[in-house]
Amino acid sequence: MTYRESRGLPSQAAAAQPGPAQPAAPGDEAPPGAPGTGETVCRTCGGTGRTPGGQADCPDCGGTGKVTAGIGGG
């Protein structure tokens, strides 16, 4: 048993593994966390996360009110 295991800590190999990726919303321009991107208000629902009638989740942001979009550039 290693020191880390005796303390209930993950092994160094397990600790180095990245966590699960966030799922992309249909309105995202890029995967969340991609370089050169940032989170912004969904243009379809205006950030409410709901369709205009308020009856369902927005199809572009999945109900979060936010999407990932490219920033800067040039």
Image (cartoon, rainbow, N blue to C red):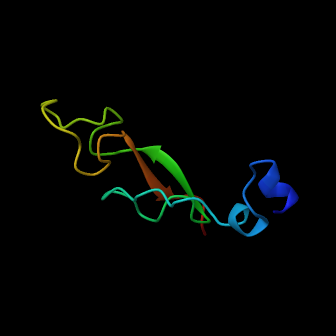
Q: Name the spot of residue 58 as percent of width and height, x first.
A: 23, 43
Task: Give left or right: position of 10 versus 32.
Answer: right
Q: Residue furthest front?
A: 1
User: Picture coordinates of residue 36 (x, y %)?
Assistant: 60, 64
Total numbered badges shown on the rendered structure: 0
Q: Nearer the viewer, residue 66 or 74?
A: 66
With respect to residue 31, does 63 lie above or below?
A: above
Asked if 7 appears above or below 74 in the picture, the reply is above
Q: What residue is rendered at 72% in x and 65% in y?
A: 16
Q: Residue furthest right?
A: 3
User: Is residue 2 rendered to the left or right of residue 32?
Assistant: right
Residue 43 at what x, y percent from top left? 33, 45
Q: Quadrant of residue 73?
A: bottom right
Q: Nearer the viewer, residue 1 or 35?
A: 1
Q: Using the rendered view, name the quadrant where residue 13 is placed.
A: bottom right
Report x, y in % for residue 7. 81, 48
Residue 62 vs residue 35: left or right? left
Relative depth, front residue between 9 and 40: 9
Q: Residue at x 81, y 63 (%)?
A: 1
Q: Residue at x 35, y 55 (%)?
A: 25
Q: Quadrant of the C terminus?
A: bottom right
Q: Is residue 20 above or below residue 9?
A: below
